[in-house]
Image (cartoon, grey):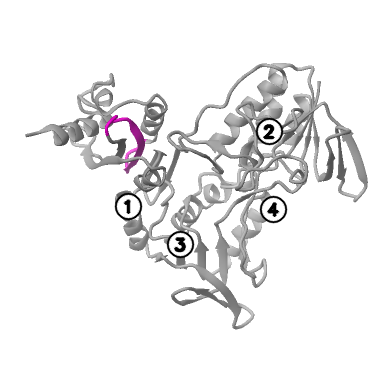
Amino acid sequence: MKVVIIGASHGGLHAALTLKKLNPQTEVILIEKRNEVSFVSSGIILRMNQLVDELDKVRYLTSEELDKKGIDVLLNATVTTIHPDKKTIIYEDIHKNTREVSYEKLILATGSNQFSTNLTLPSKDKVTVFKSYPSSVEVLKKLEKAKSISIVGGGYIGVELCDALKGKGKEIHLIESADSVLFRYLGKELSELIEQKIRDSGVKLHLNESVIGFSNIDEETFITKTTNEEIRNDYVIVAVNARPDTTLVKEFLDLNANGTVRVNEHMQTSDPDIFALGDVISYPVRNSYRKSFIPLVNNVVRSATVAAMNVLGHPMKYNMTQKTTATKIFNSYVASTGLTEVEAKFEGIEVESTFLTLPCQLPFLELQEEVHIKMVFEKGSHKLIGGQLMSEKDITQSINTLSLAIDKETTLEELVTMDFYFNPGINQPMGIISRAAYEFLIEKYKV
């Protein structure tokens, strides 16, 4: 079978590798418009935090390694047209020559455009986004020289950038239109803790503010205008509004209302020979009545596995997503899964929740670490539908436990009696999850 994949980021790469592992005889052609593959867009943050010594190292593998695995990689190849009736793809190579390639099955892994905005930007030298390796290299150089920087967007990328830039003698502004940072993933309790850490680091936090424009004042600096004030900057990073890239297929494939390609549970589009995955599709969310655009890499690679399996005739369905995330910011690990209280109410689910700060260790140990934990339950059924954690201790694996509990519709009572390990030198007889559930259970039923 001949399979063509458009896009060589996380999803396209994973699909190509999976196809070859399943059947080495499969002809796989990977088409990428850039001149490199597998660069991790958050690599800039890893480099700034000195977790890697070279930005170019933040890759899964090279095109040469893909070639050794029998995957034909076409770089600097921009697809211009897809002819689904003929099963052919037209693309331009680096010399602007038009080429054609045929397929038996096509996988769309075109991803999202980071980031879209309706604003008129002064110039890419002053206001920028980053995703590819070349753009990340350029952004790193600009950040080193800049003295006053605004970051637009208080999601993970924006907050992680603030953390990486703190303490470098720069004036940093974080601008978020919502009333809290990371509002898509955290409740107010944890958001407020993070916001205080941001302010304590010296970053100027602008909540409930939107950027409405920019104006030049001299060659070096310019004004970033928000709904509340004017900020003098010499560099701005826009970290908001990722959008699915469906330009190539919007005329002949069914799309959802949010602009993503409509797929079934097998990642198959309205054309049975075309599959789509990653940031170009929407995902079924546990405890939600609709599919949502959730550009997270863990969703991307899972959808890529499902697409590759079904392309080769092995029926496999995509499971629900809990939009499980984790990061380390301002010396704290932060993780979330499932719905927040606000999201649950939007879905029409009546909920109750608990927020606690619990010690990890028994009191006789010299080392004492705390965990902030939030759990959201459906009223009546007591079913867990959301969980959030924050601690200076690495508690990120516990969010996977909560994600699994949500997926399996685990109740409050079951969490209290769930079998978790105990070691007197590490934790307490009831693990953090069970203890939080236990305290909430007692609060609910005590006389």
* Extreme residue in the left direction: 447
Label 1 residue SS: helix
Give the alpha-carbon distance from disc 2 to disc 1, as whole Å.
Answer: 37 Å
Task: Say which residue appears at 31% left-offset and 55% top-offset.
Answer: 192
The label nearer to you, 1 versus 4, is: 1
* Extreme residue in the front direction: 348
- Three-letter amino acid code at disc 2? Leu
* Numbered tag placed on residue 176 in the rendering: 3
Question: Would residue 388 be counted in the magenta stretch?
Answer: yes
Q: Earlier in the sequence, mark 2 or mark 1?
A: 2
Q: Which residue has dot 2 on it?
A: 13
Q: Earlier in the sequence, mark 3 or mark 4?
A: 4
Residue 128 at x, y percent in the picture: 62, 62
Residue 125 at x, y percent in the picture: 66, 68
Residue 61 can be seen in this image: no
Q: Which residue has dot 1 on it?
A: 188
Residue 98 at x, y percent in the picture: 92, 45
Give the alpha-carbon distance from disc 3 to disc 4, as whole Å.
Answer: 27 Å
